[in-house]
Image: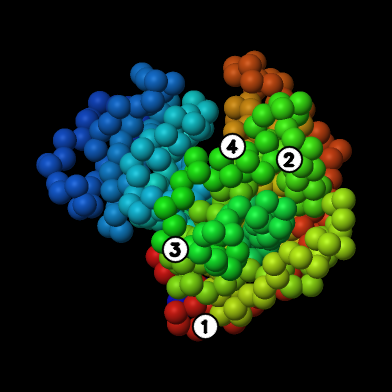
Amino acid sequence: MQQHPTPRVPARTTAPLYRRGRRRSALVAALLATALLTTAAHAPAVRADAPAAPTAADCPSALAGKARCYTGRDTQGAHYAIAVPARWNGSLVVHAHGGPDLGEASDPARSTGDLERWAVMVKEGYAWAGSSYRRGGYGTRMAAADTESVRRVFADRFGTPGRTYLHGQSWGGNVAAKVAETYGRAPGAYDGVLLTNGVLGGGSRGYDYRVDLRVVYQYYCGNHPRPTEPRYPLWQGLRPDSTMTAAGLRSRLRECTGFDTEPAARTPLQQRNLDDILAVTGIPERALESHLRFATFTFRDIVSTRLGGRNPFSNRGVRYAGSHDDRALNAGVERFAADPSARRDLSFDSDLTGKVALPVLTLHAIDDPTAFVEHESAYRSTLRGAGRAHLLVQSFTRESEHSGLSDAEYATSIAALDRWARTGHRPTPRSLAAACPAVDRAYGTGCFYDPAFTPAPYASRVLPRPGGQERAWSRIDEVGIAP
């Protein structure tokens, strides 16, 4: 496993953080953008599975007439999308998408869909590049490598940007944070990181509440698997040869809890099952199905496909509380301990060390039902432990969706990160909240910052389990999840 030198931490200063040889004048950026708009790429036909250089493609409707868009495929087979605005400011946003999706191959629609979803970055004058990743399924370091790859593709085709920023949403926040730690220390690679609604607890901690959901659900419902079906340990999520679909899982959840019916239509047992599951796990009712899908299908991918059937999860010693009968629950719930090698591999693949050398700005919905806001506490502790807390600014909004936030807030965030990287002027939650209304005049999506909010510790939401040793594991061949 290749080792990287310990990153040099920029001093806390108000002096500009420009990198030597990377200053771009507005004139150069404008000339290059004009050249891109007047020169369409006409690449020869290639095999469907072969690498493809960026070729001209239709832009999303929101960017029609405002940018030139490209698609291609890198040497690892990952599809990607790129956009360069007509009035390019000379800088680039490299996007890491969430998920993970569970298809076998790279999906070209993923990166083009993400471009449409975050067109706000292009509207703000930034070029944009995003990878679909080389395959579906779990693999944070694999996704990080493919994210770095699309940055290199952009630089090779369009030249080195004046500044380059990482952006990751959801699991993409984990990926982008891993990119920053793994590749961000290379001179000229990246200048800052924006993490929005990020899964920042890492795989070894970030999914423990779904482990709890999987076992608590089965205790009350007993239909996943049913008594008449082949048994398997619940840490598998789902047995490898199962043909269960998302619709089939939804049917079982409805059968047990009536979760998607009116309360008056539920039986007393369904209501009690639902109340107990939600109270014990702390999962919001509106997100119950999506969390159970993850604890079923994504757990199967992690365990059976990525870890060769080894168990990375544990609930040994966890005491569950909040039900109508905690004693019976704790006596009857399935218990298991992780295989140390599996936990090591999942931790090395996805846990974060906090060893960043770049400004990091986070934005998180306080009522995020998927990546609980307490993930931010875990990340803050990680950077503090690594002596990098001065490189982190966290902001929070009174929003309640996981997959998308206000465009005005994305625009405010990238502008603040850019200013921080260029001048050393560190934003604050209050300065972000104050800047947003002026930005929102262009977007009309609202500003919902709460500068006074501080998240509770991660352990207040998810009972802790043991951690691991990323640095030691990095010296051992074959540790981690294969690309």
| Residue count near mark 4 (Cα–Cα under 10 Å), binned few <14, some 14–19, many ≥20 | some
Instruction: Mark 2 vs mark 3: give the one in front.
Output: 2
Residue located beneath label 2 in the image: 270
Q: Residue at x 57, y 72 (%)?
A: 311
Whether residue 353 is situated above or below residue 209 in the rendered picture: below
Kind of residue sitting beneath label 1: Arg
CA gap between label 1 and label 3 equals 31 Å
> Which residue corresponds to mark 1?
475
Q: Secondary structure at mark 4?
A: loop
Near-viewer residue (31 or 189):
189
> Residue at the location (63% across, 41% down)?
255
Question: In this view of the protein, can residue 367 be seen by the observer?
Answer: no
Tell me if 278 is positioned left or right of 184 in this view.
right
Nearer the camera: disc 1 or disc 3: 3
Q: Quadrant of residue 264?
A: top right
Q: Nearest to the eye among marks 4 and 1: give it.
A: 4
Q: Along the horizontal axis of the image, is 268 left or right of 24?
A: right
Label 3: how many residues lie within 10 Å, few (<14), some (14-19) or many (20+)?
some
Q: Position of residue 71 (x, y in %)?
A: 30, 39
Q: Report the amino acid beneath label 2.
A: Gln
Mark 4 to mark 1: distance in Å? 36 Å
Choose mark 4 or mark 3, whichever is in front. Answer: 3
Nearer the N terminus, badge 2 or badge 3?
3
Residue 403 is tagged as: 4
Locate residue 358, reporting x and y percent: 61, 55
Sequence-wise, which precedes: disc 1 or disc 3? 3
Indicate which disc, 1 or 2, sits on the residue closer to the N terminus. 2
Question: In this rendering, which labeled residue sits more in front, label 4 or label 2?
Answer: 2
Q: Earlier in the sequence, mark 4 or mark 3?
A: 3
CA separation, marks 2 and 3?
29 Å
Residue 125 to residue 197: above or below: above
State the residue position of label 3: 240
